[in-house]
Image (cartoon, rainbow, N blue to C red):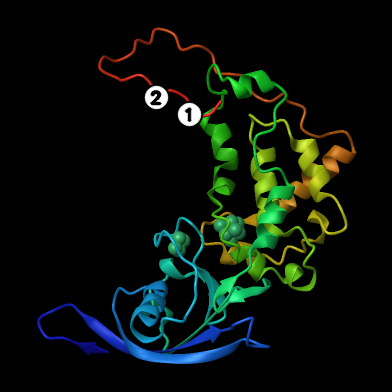
Amino acid sequence: MDTKKGTNHHTKTITFRVQRFDPNRDAEPRLQEYTFPVSQGMTVLDCLIYIKEKLDGSLSFRASCRMGICGSCAMFVNGFPILTCHTQTFELNADVIEIRSLPNYPIIKDLIPDLTMLFEKHKSIKPYIIRTDIKEIESPTREYHQSPQELEDYLQFSYCLKCGICLSACPTVATDRAFIGPQALGQAFRYNNDTRDGGTAERLDAIDHPHGVWRCHMAGACADACPKGVDPAMAAQLLKRQAAAAVFGRGKKAKPAGVAPEPKNVSRRPNIPDAPPRTVE
Ligand code: SF4
Ligand code: FES
């Protein structure tokens, strides 16, 4: 490691072996090498941006927020799926870093996976609050009631970024692309466990089939890899319990929470402007 005198600026020469694939030209992905000095503080995504800006403008990859929020920069780095914007290059402690697109997905180009499978599975479990009081949903009078503890019961699962890392780590998805997969199971549990929701039966129908929740063998690779601590493996086991309870007529009985009671003895603070008018009807 070189140290420039008088500064705290460390650099290290690293070779990146980066997956290249042009569907119009290549039969198989190949690896292309780029070697350059990496500065301390550069993330793996910063290194890819450096390659694209300084060495090879033809390299394609996907990224957006650069702060671990959007999930679009997920890649397979030195054999493990990670968010590249959230990984310090020096922390990999390697002189050679291999970067591929996420396994288990078709490749669109270079490092860009086709995530259609992820979003189709996600949509299939109806990832939204389902209720029968349509009038209240369309013209809400107040928020639905939910206690801080009830929020805690599903909060962890609501952190999902839809990055797709868990599907790329899952050994069952590797052998059965129709398996509903950890991300959708995590989100089915998130909504089933939300006290404002009344859609548990519909979601259990969506996951209780030959490629559904029962195919999860609890390998736990999804939970190990998830960058947000969602733990889809645990969600899958809890969903199995919900599905079995429903078969024996012991499923969720409580009605979805109603609107919160009108606050009492509350006066509006002065100088708070009115809410802007609705933009959609
Ligand atoms: S559960 Fe975790 S790994 Fe899977 S898509 Fe959501 S954030 Fe990514
Ligand atoms: S660029 Fe958004 S999570 Fe990495």
Screen quadrant of the C terminus: top right
- Secondary structure of the residue carrying tag 2 is loop
Q: Which residue: 73% across, 62% down? A: 218
- Mark number for residue 279? 1
Q: Which residue: 17% across, 77% down? A: 8
- Mark number for residue 152? none
- Residue 201 appears in which quarter of the rendering? top right
Please state which of residues 64 and 92 is positioned toward the viewer in this rendering.
64
Q: Residue 245 placed where, x, y %?
A: 83, 40
- CB at disc 1 and ligand 2 closer than 8 Å: no
Q: Residue 199 placed where, x, y %?
A: 74, 34
Q: Which residue: 67% across, 71% down? A: 105
Q: Quadrant of ligand 1?
A: bottom right
- Secondary structure of the residue carrying tag 1 is loop
- CB at disc 2 and ligand 2 closer than 8 Å: no
Amino acid at dot 1: Thr
Which residue is denoted by mark 2 in the rendering?
276
Count the labels in the image: 2
Packing grade of label 2 (10 A; few <14, some 14-19, many >=20) is few
Labels 2 & 1 near each other (Cβ < 8 A): yes
Packing grade of label 1 (10 A; few <14, some 14-19, many >=20) is few
